[in-house]
Amino acid sequence: MGLRCLCAVLLALPGAWGVCPPPPRFVFAEPTAPLNESYAVGTNLTYRCRPGYTMVKSPVVTCLSSSHWSSNPDFCIGKSCGPPNIMNGNFEYTTNLSLGATINVTCNIGYRLIGKPSVQCILGGNEVFWDDIPHCAIIPCLPPPKIENGQLNSGNRDFTYGMAAIYSCNDGFDLIGKNTIHCTTDDNLNGIWSGPAPECKVVRCENPTVKNGKRLSGFGLEHKYKSTVTFECNPDYFLNGSSVVTCEADNTWKPPLPTCDPGCGPAPQFPFAELSSAVGDSSPAGTELSYRCKPGYTAAQGKSSVVPCLSNRTWSADPDFCIRQQCARPNIENGDVNADSFPFETVVTFTCHPGYELKVPSAKCVVSGNGVDWDPASPYCEKRLPVLCEEPPTIANGTHNGTKGMDFVQGSTVAYKCNHGFTLAGEPFLRCIARDQYQGAWSSPAPECRGGANIIIVGIFPLLLAMLVMNI
């Protein structure tokens, strides 16, 4: 009996197996009946939504065999205050618009906020509402300023954001400035006017003249506010300044009247340079002409290729601002170059060493691509073929020391001699000389060997005379 009672007591304790403790509490709901200390497994309890909340799921919780309560989460949610109606404004929010939500209210451009900038969705009885919605009021401006010698055409009324004040001047007066100003704002709280009110005054500019120029418009003698005059210069003069001037509120022309200044004549010509772009027959002072070096020339160091027109109507140029390009020194094998410098358009000649013949006598430094080079490109010296003479002529009653069948080249020498009893008449030595660059010839005709029988007779005659005298 005692054990049974003890088990009953243990089962009745909250959290014991098969028993649930009191159900959980919710901020959005409350039980429909008073709660007990413990509940048997399978017990269902029903909740109702608290004021300001509405039911969206089943409000029943159940005691499970694990001694825990089961329930649908958030079965009651806060009621929505709905979007507020804010004329000429808007609101910003980061959550939904239900109970407890806070929104920030802003006004459109030209309107200012009246009231608190933030409002909250609060509970009143069993309903929710926005605690204190502000409103947006249009921004007013103070009355526009009055002007002398003129009037405001917009009438006497209140001016608010976006409205315009329109001015006009009395007869004989010119309106200086804008005839209309607008009510605007720079802080979205207070109204201001977009600019100052205009002035009404009499404006007259002097009759304008430009020396060495003439008018194209504005021919009258009286020039009122905002009158314009257009000028052009006479031939050979150039406009310095604006061609159009306007009569402004301080009775002066703006920009200042131009001048017509003399200019320089045709662009200068140079043998070594040409203009980078075409120009007319005359140019105003201050004009700068740009030149580029002609082919075969290059810019001289430290000199400018820009030629300005000076105020004295003359062109000013650095002398020789382009100089001739230099060809490389030509190299001729077995020969020599007859020059020491090789600028563009130079013609150089060559000589060959002895025994060589010049095939290209000269070369010229000419334009090649972006630089210069030689034309023709390769002068050369060719080895000269030997000049040969025919075999030396033979002579009667004599011989020469030349060997038959040998080559007799230029400079070869042969000697002649006569047989015994003969006398040599003529040159005893013949030399092979060049008749032209290919053919040789002997320096003189072959000699002769004279005498023979005459000498014998001359030798016998004294012998015969002696024999007769001696009666032999």
Image (cartoon, grey):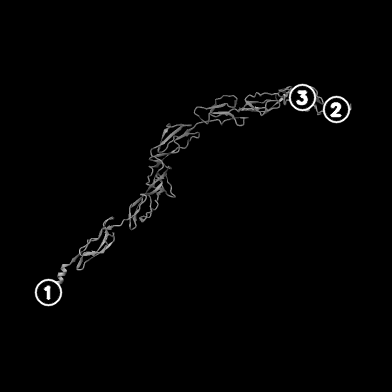
- Mark in front: 3 vs 1: 1
- What residue is rendered at 87% in x and 26% in y? 4
Is tag 3's residue or tag 1's residue first in the polypeptide sequence? Answer: 3
Q: Amino acid at mark 3?
A: Thr
Q: Amino acid at mark 1?
A: Leu
Residue linked to disc 1: 465
- At mark 2, the secondary structure is helix
**At which x and y percent is residue 331?**
38, 54
Residue linked to disc 3: 62
- Identify the mark at residue 7; answer none if there is no mark: 2
- At mark 1, the secondary structure is helix
Q: CA distance from mark 2 to mark 1?
A: 208 Å
Res. 320 visible in picture: no
- Position of residue 260 relative to residue 357, above or below, is above
Q: Amino acid at mark 2?
A: Cys
**At which x and y percent is residue 245?**
46, 35
Res. 182 visible in picture: yes
Is tag 2's residue or tag 1's residue first in the polypeptide sequence? Answer: 2
- What residue is rendered at 20% in x and 67% in y? 423
Say which quarter of the image contains residue 434. Answer: bottom left
Direction bottom: furthest residue: 470
Left or right side of 372 for 198: right
